[in-house]
Image: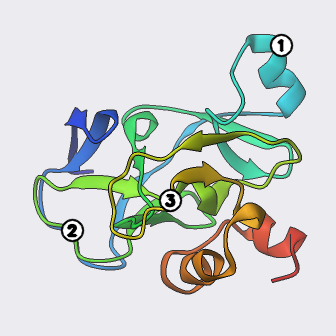
């Protein structure tokens, strides 16, 4: 894993120490997995942990915990929790993924987006609340967690 943590778009971010080519694994995402009820008991706020299944959330380890959102991401998450480059990434470029590619919940959590991408949607929210064009882009170009594809019969 050739990344480093430094100030980024939204606070602290993860940056490439070297170039990555499209399709190359950047890191394995690790952490403890909990149900939503377990997260409530231990005090995690909604939307913070990485959703990895229906009612399954990972409290992620460093350095991934510092990976920021972008509506025009250069990385995506595979079903086996690898962060991979979805386009070529230059050395010292911030590595970002689209949080909506991992989110499908039954509550109304969302946040204002500050990614500054040309295609910024203005809000980060669950995949099923995205405009159809944004859903298609994530499905075809970035990747969406399998539990979302299955739940929505995509």
Mark 3 is surrounded, within 10 Å at the Cα level, by few (under 14), some (14 to 19) or many (20 or more) other residues, namely: many
- Label 1 Cα neighbours within 10 Å, binned few <14 / some 14-19 / many ≥20: few
3 vs 2, front mark: 3
Q: Is residue 106 above or below residue 74?
A: above
Secondary structure beneath label 1: helix
Judging by the rendered image, the residue that carries numbered circle 2 is 89
Say which residue appears at 63% left-offset and 66% top-offset: 79
Q: Residue at x 49, y 60 (%)?
A: 82
Q: Residue 116: percent from the left, percent from the top?
A: 32, 55
Lower sequence index among marks 3 and 2:
2
- Tell me residue 84's x, y (percent): 40, 66
Q: Give the percent coordinates (x, y) of residue 50.
A: 62, 43
Q: Mark 3 or mark 1: which comes first in sequence? A: 1
Instruction: Say few, some or many: other residues with alpha carbon within 10 Å of mark 2 (under 14 / 14 to 19 / 20 or more).
Output: many
Residue designated by label 3: 98
Between the C-alphas of marks 3 and 2, the distance is 15 Å
Question: Horizontal placement of 70 versus 102: left or right?
Answer: left
The residue lying furthest to the top in this view is 42
Q: Which residue carries the number 1 mark?
A: 41
């Amino acid at each position: 894993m050739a990344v480093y943590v430094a100030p980024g778009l939204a606070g602290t971010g993860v940056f490439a120490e070297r170039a990555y080519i499209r399709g190359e694994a950047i890191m394995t995402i690790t952490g403890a997995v909990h149900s939503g009820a377990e997260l409530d008991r231990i005090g995690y706020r909604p939307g913070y942990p990485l959703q990895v299944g229906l009612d399954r959330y990972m409290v992620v380890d460093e350095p991934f915990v510092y990976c920021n959102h972008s509506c025009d991401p250069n990385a995506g998450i595979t079903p086996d929790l690898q962060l991979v480059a979805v386009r070529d990434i230059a050395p010292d470029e911030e590595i970002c993924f689209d949080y909506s590619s991992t989110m499908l919940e039954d509550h109304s959590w969302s946040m204002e987006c500050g990614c500054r991408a040309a295609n910024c949607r203005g809000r980060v929210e669950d995949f099923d609340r995205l405009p159809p064009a944004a859903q298609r882009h994530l499905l075809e170009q970035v990747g969406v967690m399998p539990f979302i594809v299955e739940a929505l019969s995509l």
